[in-house]
Each structure stands twice: as structure tokens, then as C-alpha cells.
Image (cartoon, coloured by chain):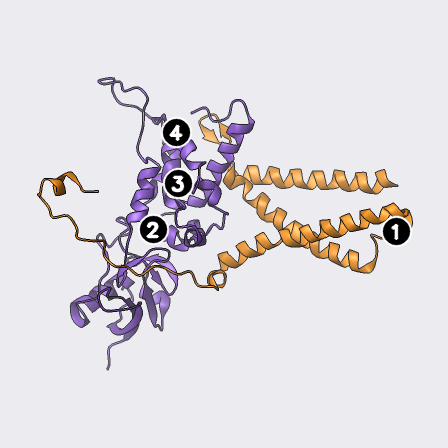
Amino acid sequence: MHTAAERDGLVPAPAEAPRSYPYRQPLDWFTRRRGYVLYLARELTALPIAIWWLLFLVELSRLRDGSGGYRPLEGWFVAVSVVCLVAALYHSYTFLSFAGLIMRIPLGERNVPARVIAGAAFSGFAVLTVVIAALLIWGGA
Amino acid sequence: MTAKTITLSVSRYDPERDEKPSLQSYEVPYRDDMVVLDALNWIKAHADGSVNFRWSCRMGICGSCGMNVNGEPKLGCSAFLRDYLPGPVVVEPLNNFPVLRDLIIDMDSFMEKLRWVKPWIIRQETALGGGENRQTTAQIDQFRQFSMCINCMLCYSACPVIAIEPEFVGPAAIALARRYDLDSRDQAGQERLRTLTGNDAIWDCSFIGECSAVCPKDVDPAKAIQQTKFESTMGMLLPWGGKK
């Protein structure tokens, strides 16, 4: 496509696009900045959580053989669960930390401060955790 | 007594001669108050006039001298040599852009992306002679941070998504779109949102956040992108969402 000035012959049209060297992302790009490493750590936390759910479904399927088949407190399952808990807590921490950044809640002419939103998100998380734990521990009993 | 010097390894690429870029080292006189751009200008003036790089204001306003300094996207005019002692200082072109020559990148794709998000005030009705569109300080504060962008493209260099998906509209363009969305005088929020929620836009971002980490003007493009994601989601879920 030519500009009006080129069509009118005021400036010569460029003969062809200049040759350039394309950028190639190195395979180890994620090691080059601390932020990339933390990002990958955050994203990879989804993997153990997904694995835990698969194992949990396997445990549940054993219930078909009666309650004796359900052995969620075996050592290996507890160990996997602890790893998954750490991953889930880290993921939750990063997610909730961003809440104040992501949400813009108008309050009059200004916005609710980011710290208040993040604080409310962490508080809500803590309250919900206590409620669910209470339901599981005392409700189950 | 010998004068103190520092080594600069500068990426060189001549499209008519070289297959790929390579580093060339220069010994540059060192002073505590020198920045990388000063060193490059010294090389150009005293050692090798064929070194090519963009620069203009020398004070972090024009956004011309974006380059990788020791692998970190920086403005050459704000990167002090004293922070890289004893050297060498490796100076390369920004990542994620084709290199035209030495430190000069091809920024056509970025200019196209900028136009795509319509970073200007759009009004549905034009009241000629109606006076100024006045704003309160609070209204200006809503978008002030995003208006500080100088189009230096450091955020594009730090964004790994761009390397995988070159069509991704990218951090600075979305931050500028956000700047106009939050402007009380603008009336095209929905129009821009349709663009930004389409292909190659906000949903390509996986929130790595390095665009904000390298921004020399604290624009925080990651915040602009996530806020746009949040508001577009709320616009779908809530009946009063996405009013503008």
C-alpha cells in the first residue's frame, strides 16, 4: 500500500522491506528472570492439585467395594496431600495478593484502596477455611 | 595513572553482511555519572561510527533508547554504568522484535497494535463550541498512571507471550486502551472492550507481570490488562456491568 505522497511522486516508494533478523526465544527463557521462575512455580502448582484430585477419585471409586476399600489416611496419600496443600496455599496466596491490583471498586470519586481489597480477600479466605474445616471435622463426626 | 575504563559488548548486525548478530567489545572511559547511552555515544564518536542505535531526549521521556542491558530491558539513558561494575556490560536489542541493524529493532508491528486499540478520545456526540470537557483531579487520577506510557517497548521485550504469540496486542497498547477507557471524556469503552476481548488481546495474557516490573514509568500494564479482564467478566455476569 502506498501513501498519498508516494502516489503523487513526492517521495519515492520503498523498494522492498529491509532484511531483518527475527527474534528467537531461547529454550531456557524461563530461567532468565526471577519473575519468570516465580510465574512458572505459580502455574505449576496446578499440576499437583490435579494429581491429588485424580488420586482422590481413585480412592472414592474404591468405595464400591465397601468402606474398607477407602483408605485416605495411608502414608503415601497423606504425603501427597501435604505437598498438594503447600502448592494450593502458594497458589491461593498469589491469587489473593493480586486481588487488590485486579479489582477496581469505585467509591464515590475514588476507588477502594488495593490493600483493603486484598485484606478482605485474605480475611474471606481464612473465614471460609475455618468454616469448611469445622464442617468436615465436626460435621463428619 | 591510567584512566578508568569499562568494557561494553555491543550487539552488531549488518543485514547486508551478517547471517546473525554477534557481540563486539569496546573499551569506554568510565565516569560515575555515565549511562549506557553516554557510552554508546562515546563509541559512535570516538571508536566506531558504524554502531547504530536509537536515542533522542536522554532523560527518560521519549522512549527511544530501549535496549537490553545485561539481559534486562532498560532505557539506555537511565541505565548507569556504575550499576554494572566492573563490567563487561552487554548491550543488545530488545527481545521479541526483528532486528534491523545493531540495536535498532523493527517497531512496525507495535505501531500497528497501537492503532488497533484506538488510543485517543472518542465521543459519540461532538458539541462544537460547547466549551471545555472539564475533569476533576479525582477523574484524572483514575487514568493518570496509564497515561505515563512513553512507548519504549520494554514491556514487550519482557513479555514471553509475545515470543510465542507475536500477534498478541501486548502490554503497552492495552495500558493505553485502559487509559482512555478510564477517561471521563471518552465514550468508546464498549467499542474498545470488544476489541480487547477478541483474539490476540487480553485473554492471551497469562499474568506473568514482568511487563510491570521493567516499566521505567511505573505504568503497570499488567494491572491494566487484569483490570480489563475483570471488568469484561463483570460486564457479562452483572446486569449493570460495562456501562460506558
**Chain whose colour in the figure is purple:** B
Above or below B86: residue B170: above
Q: Which mark is residue B174?
A: 3
Which quadrant: the C terminus of chain B?
top left
The residue mark sitting in front, 1 or 2, is 1
Q: Which residue is mark 1?
A: A69
Are discs 2 and 4 less than 8 Å apart at CB? no
The residue nearer to you, when weighing A128 against B82, is A128
Q: Position of residue B215 (x, y in %)?
A: 38, 50
Can you see residue B238?
A: yes
Whole-angstrom CA distance, mark 2 to mark 4, is 25 Å
What chain is colored orange? A
**1 vs 3, front mark:** 1
Q: Which residue is mark 2?
A: B153
Residue under numbered circle 4? B191
Give the amino acid type for the residue marked by disc 4 in the picture: Glu
Q: Chain of mark 3?
A: B
Amino acid type at circle 2 is: Met
Q: Quadrant of residue A86?
A: bottom right
**Where is B54 relative to B168, above or below?**
below
